[in-house]
Image (cartoon, grey):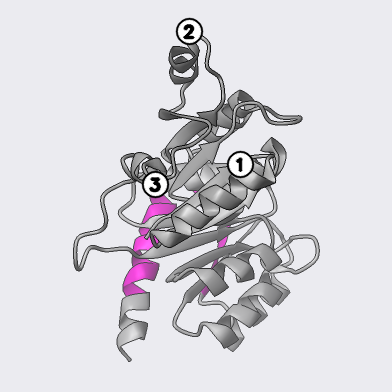
Amino acid sequence: MARILIIEDNPANVELMAFLLAAYGHTPISAPDGARGVAAARAERPDLVACDVNLPGMNGFEVLAVLKAEPQLAGVPVLAVTALAMAGDREKVLAAGFDGYISKPIEPESFVAELEAFLAPPDAPGENRRTVLLVDDDPFMLAVLGEMLADEPYRVLSAASGEEGLELLRREPVEVILCDQSMPGMSGTEMLSRAATLYPHTVRLMLTGQQDLAGVEAAVHSGVADAHYAKPVSATSLRERMAEALRQQEVRRRL
């Protein structure tokens, strides 16, 4: 079922929405304000976002603008869930770019069905749902890499740190990891070392702009990483390497 992010500052509303979604088999995720909602969307990659318009700090329109500007989130439906009731309010939120509009107070009998109408149809049996995980502490680089792979026939997840990447691996099936080496806190080699132990079926790749490659080459030699590539990388080269890595992972999975 779907992972649905609720961005809402009223705890009672969050509790009711989450209860209804969970009752229908969906996974609710919540954030109490716009900034944390954007962070949750980046980390969780939900299937749909239900966002209040009148949020403290960053309002719903600002949240929408950020989400729609990011290549990896632009395709996620964002619904305005709001108590706005003046004439023209619905047209206003739709004109701003929201994919849909649900009035508060919500109707428990129809709330889930209203959200489900905006979800992508479930995957057909046997459909390819392979996943590539990008790990880099540079938001610009993550966005560039995500844009390069946006039209490829697999999911692309992103994480801004090694710790965040490992948390995603804990929750999501991933076939290929492409990880930066130089990150604050946990380095790329440390993150891939843990991934190799916990998820040995993955193909683990490093992308680095460092000139000193001793640590990276040691990781490849030991089997922690399968290969390393230098930054910058072209879109064509990146797509070719991801396709090769996915083929390699398929062979590894069958062994």
Name above or below for residue 163 compared with residue 44.
below
Q: Main secondary structure of the magenta part?
A: helix
Residue at 56% x, 77% y: name it: 225
| Count of numbered labels shown in the rendering | 3
Reading the image, the residue beneath label 3 is 112
Q: Nearer the viewer, mark 1 or mark 2?
A: 2
Q: Amino acid at mark 3?
A: Val
| Quadrant hosting residue 217 | bottom right
Q: Circle 2 — which element?
A: loop
Residue 74, how many percent across, how many down? Answer: 46, 36
Specify start and end residues of the magenta stretch as a single range.
Answer: 227-248
How far is disc 3 from disc 1 in space, using C-alphas? 16 Å
Residue at 45% x, 17% y: name it: 90
Reading the image, the residue beneath label 2 is 87
Q: Quadrant of the C terminus?
A: bottom left
Name above or below for residue 131 compared with residue 38.
below
Quick one: label 1, few (<14), some, or many (20+) residues within 10 Å?
A: many
Residue 136, how many percent across, how many down? Answer: 64, 56
Residue 120, how many percent across, how many down? Answer: 31, 46
Name above or below for residue 27 compared with residue 81.
below
Q: Earlier in the sequence, mark 3 or mark 1?
A: 1
Q: Amino acid at mark 1?
A: Ile
Q: Amino acid at mark 2?
A: Ala
Reading the image, the residue beneath label 1 is 7
Residue at 70% x, 53% y: name it: 137
Quick one: label 2, few (<14), some, or many (20+) residues within 10 Å?
A: few
Residue 153 among those drawn in magenta: no
Q: Circle 3 — which element?
A: helix
Residue at 68% x, 48% y: name it: 138
Residue 199, how many percent across, how many down? Answer: 52, 82
